[in-house]
Amino acid sequence: MPTSRARAILGTVALVWLVASYPPARGGDERTFKGEIADTQCALNVHSLSQSHKEMISMKPEVKTNADCARYCVKERGGKFVLQTPEKVYKLDAQVLAEQWAGLKVKVIGTLDPKTDLITVRSIEALAASPGNTAHPK
């Protein structure tokens, strides 16, 4: 029968193995995604016909930019911040961080759960300084 010290060592080894085998802990599945921080309302055509902010910007005088639209749709329409790429819309676990980059073209580094299309975000940064895209979040 193992001693309590042996059980503790075996438990620690098992816990270390479990944590090391979990993909985000390894960082092995980490990827870079590029797109715009948008909102589910526009990106998933809840009130948009073009998967864009055009309709909301034309309907609401207080909504002048993509950033205004994304923040408005999250705050007032129950949306969530997402990463919208030309091919796909990804959910983001870091909503507070994503809000800072609303409406901007960004690079998101994180781990994707392919079953839920949820990115566990490690970082978000601007793609490049260009008209309509600032190097720093608001």
Image: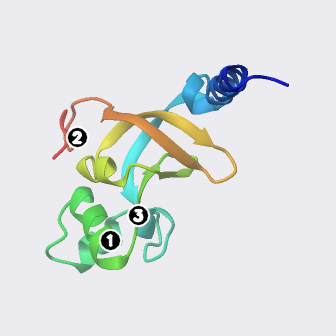
Label 3 crowd bin: few (<14), some (14–19), many (20+), radius 10 Å: many
Cβ atoms under marks 3 and 1 closer than 8 Å: no
Q: Which residue is mark 2?
A: 133
How far apart marks 3 and 2 lie (CA) works out to 21 Å
In the figure, residue 124 lies in which quadrant? top left
Q: Is residue 52 above or below residue 96?
A: below
Q: Is residue 44 above or below residue 100?
A: below
The type of residue carrying mark 3 is Lys
Q: Secondary structure at mark 3?
A: loop
Foreground mark, 2 or 1, reads: 1
Q: Residue at x 29, y 45 (%)?
A: 104
Q: Quadrant of the N terminus?
A: top right
Q: Which residue is mark 3?
A: 80
- In primary-sequence order, the first of circles 3 and 2 is 3
Q: Which residue is mark 1?
A: 73
**In the image, residue 39 lies at what x, y percent?**
39, 62
Q: Residue at x 26, y 70 (%)?
A: 72
Task: Please tell me the numbered disc located at residue 115.
Answer: none
**In the visual, does 117 lie left or right of 7?**
left
Foreground mark, 3 or 1, reads: 3
How far apart marks 2 and 1 lie (CA) works out to 20 Å
